[in-house]
Image (cartoon, helix red, strand yellow):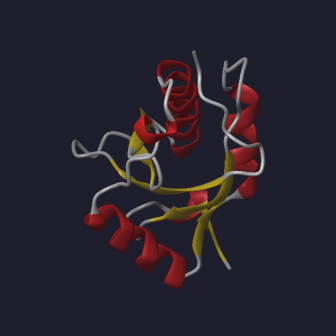
């Protein structure tokens, strides 16, 4: 049985290059879940789908929330302080491309590390 996540719940994500530098990772800070893709948009799509799978797999809210490692929080904080957020159109396109049929997470902010190219980022 899936847990119930309030529609008002908001999540934060940090985008950074994958370890092989051939793509990107979208890392949800509150859930320690990741999505990987060749573009930030595809990484967000994969993250949305990972969140839905996690919701369906959990039958207890205590199984759902696991915070990302401190290093990811620090990367997010630096990106946020620099005002580096992923372009809203990229996030919106990821929502449209996801194949989820249940809960769609509400991302409060998707920050981008300094290593993410400028074409994907707006500076607030």
Left or right, 44 with respect to 91, comes to left
Name, please, the residue furthest toward the left: 20
Q: Position of residue 20 (x, y in %)?
A: 22, 42
- Could you tell me how many numbered marks the image carries? 0
Q: Position of residue 66 (x, y in %)?
A: 38, 48
Quarter-of-image position of residue 120: bottom right
Quadrant showing the N terminus: top right
Question: Does residue 114 sit above or below 21 in this rendering?
Answer: below
Q: Position of residue 72 (x, y in %)?
A: 33, 62
Quarter-of-image position of residue 24: top left
Q: Image point 30% across, 45% down: which residue? A: 18
Left or right, 61 with respect to 20, comes to right
Q: Image point 67% across, 18% down: which residue? A: 99
Name, please, the residue furthest toward the bottom: 81
In the image, 14 versus 113, the foreground residue is 14
Question: Does residue 124 sit above or below 69 in this rendering?
Answer: below
Question: Does residue 17 sit above or below 60 in this rendering?
Answer: below
Quadrant showing the C terminus: bottom right
């Amino acid at each position: 049985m899936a847990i119930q996540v309030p529609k008002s719940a908001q999540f934060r994500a940090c985008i950074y290059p994958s370890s092989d530098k051939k793509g990107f990772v979208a890392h949800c800070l509150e859930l320690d879940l990741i999505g990987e893709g060749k573009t930030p948009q595809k990484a967000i799509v994969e993250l949305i789908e990972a969140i839905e799978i996690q919701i369906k797999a959990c039958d207890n809210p205590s199984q759902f929330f696991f915070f990302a490692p401190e290093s990811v929080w620090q990367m997010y904080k630096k990106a946020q302080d620099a005002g580096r957020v992923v372009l809203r159109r990229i996030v919106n396109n990821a929502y449209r491309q996801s194949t989820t049929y249940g809960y769609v997470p509400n991302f409060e902010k998707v920050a981008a590390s300094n290593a993410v190219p400028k074409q994907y980022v707006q500076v607030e």
